[in-house]
Image: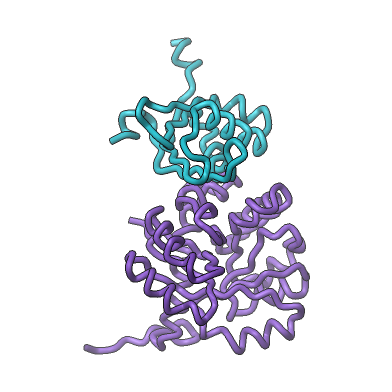
């Protein structure tokens, strides 16, 4: 029961990166999202967002971003405000979001 | 199902129009209000028709005085489907907020005067927040946009969120535009209304007025077939 209380609900966002940045690495994307969340909401939002970025094998320019349910508006806005990744112009487009990866990829 | 609208796409050059409109359609918008020069409008309309998007004519005016705004409105109102006013003067903001010929007041410019209770009391028109202002001008524009959104929500003023995109990198999906309002305290449905129902109603009503199907008092003309 205690474990259930400690585990926060998550949301998964399917994100496509477009622009001159070419194929973006997972680390670069995670860094760009974290910077943007930090800029918007500071350390508190960044800590509460519990961000993780996944790039499944074979995917190019597409990512799955995981965040806490509570911080979804902040993370969505942070992704909207990304203008460059690794110093090159880019935009992050959120295709959809869901509570499970399985539903996200349906 | 919601029909999403981008209330401000800015075509600086006709060569950019097709790519911009195609991208907007791909992102899920079924209607867009386009600001373009009159000579480019034919090409813009053709590009929109090809991708199955409803294109509306938009004009953003930045008058230097109230008198000039009235002159521009009397000349241009019924040539366009959507007229927005950008200003950094309080008297102009007040006049634009209550004039029935204006559709929206752009409220994401950092130089916009504070929206106080006197302005709220006379406001009939929508408040528009543009993503491009936030992307270009950063924190000052975001702070202004957030305050404008909170005023609109608290005082039940119509809210429109647009991209203001001048190139493909300025465009975002409807849900991302809605996130600007969502992160400022709007409920998800209020935020989505700002990129769907509210601008769509303004655009459809104005087009009906331009075509003579709706009169100035808001009465629809019913035609028997």
Front residue (pair B49, B179): B49
Coordinates of residue B113 in the picture (x, y in percent):
76, 63
The chain shown in purple is which?
Answer: B
Coordinates of residue B145 in the picture (x, y in percent):
65, 54
Note whether A31 is above or below B174 in the view shown: above
Relative horizontal placement of residue A84, taking residue A95 as reference (left or right): right
**Residue B30 sits in which quadrant?**
bottom left
Relative horizontal placement of residue A101, taking residue B66 as reference (left or right): left
Name the residue: 70% across, 50% down: B143
Q: Does the image show residue B161?
A: no
Chain A, chosen colour in render = cyan
Residue reaching furthest to the top: A2
**Residue A63 sits in which quadrant?**
top left
Note whether A7 is above or below B132 in the view shown: above
Q: How is the image coloured?
A: by chain
The number of callouts visible is: 0
**Residue A79 sits in which quadrant?**
top right
Coordinates of residue B72 in the picture (x, y in percent):
65, 85
Placement of the C terminus of chain B among the 4 image quadrants: bottom left
Relative horizontal placement of residue B50, taking residue B36 as reference (left or right): left
Name the residue: 36% across, 25% down: A57
Note whether B95 is above or below B147 in the view shown: below
Coordinates of residue A76 in the picture (x, y in percent):
52, 40
Name the residue: 72% across, 84% down: B68
């Amino acid at each position: 029961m205690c474990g259930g209380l400690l585990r926060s609900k998550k949301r998964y966002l399917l994100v496509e990166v477009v622009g001159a940045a070419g194929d973006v690495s997972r680390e670069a994307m995670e860094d760009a999202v974290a910077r943007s969340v930090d800029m918007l909401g500071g350390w508190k939002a960044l800590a509460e967002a519990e961000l993780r970025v996944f790039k499944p094998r074979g995917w190019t320019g597409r990512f799955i971003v995981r965040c806490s349910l509570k911080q979804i508006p902040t993370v969505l806005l942070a992704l909207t405000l990304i203008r460059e990744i690794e110093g090159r112009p880019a935009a992050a487009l959120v295709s959809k979001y869901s509570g499970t990866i399985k539903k996200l990829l349906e | 199902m919601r029909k999403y609208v981008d209330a401000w796409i800015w075509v600086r050059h006709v060569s950019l129009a097709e790519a911009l409109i195609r991208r907007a359609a791909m992102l899920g918008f079924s209607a867009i209000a386009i600001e373009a020069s009159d000579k480019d409008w034919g090409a813009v309309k053709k590009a929109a028709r090809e991708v199955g998007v409803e294109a509306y004519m938009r004009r953003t005016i930045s008058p230097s005085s109230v008198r000039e705004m009235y002159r521009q409105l009397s000349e241009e109102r019924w040539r366009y489907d959507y007229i927005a006013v950008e200003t950094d003067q309080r008297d102009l903001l007040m006049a634009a907020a209550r004039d029935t010929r204006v559709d929206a007041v752009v409220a994401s410019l950092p130089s916009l005067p504070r929206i106080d209770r006197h302005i709220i009391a006379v406001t009939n028109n929508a408040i528009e927040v543009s993503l491009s202002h936030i992307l270009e001008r950063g924190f000052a524009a975001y702070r202004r946009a957030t305050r404008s959104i909170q005023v609109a929500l608290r005082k039940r003023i119509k809210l429109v969120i647009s991209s203001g995109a001048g190139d493909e990198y300025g465009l975002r999906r409807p849900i991302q535009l809605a996130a600007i309002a969502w992160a400022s305290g709007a409920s998800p449905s209020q935020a989505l209304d700002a990129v769907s129902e509210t601008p769509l109603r303004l655009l459809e009503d104005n087009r009906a007025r331009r075509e003579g199907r709706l009169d100035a008092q808001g009465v629809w003309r019913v035609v028997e077939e």
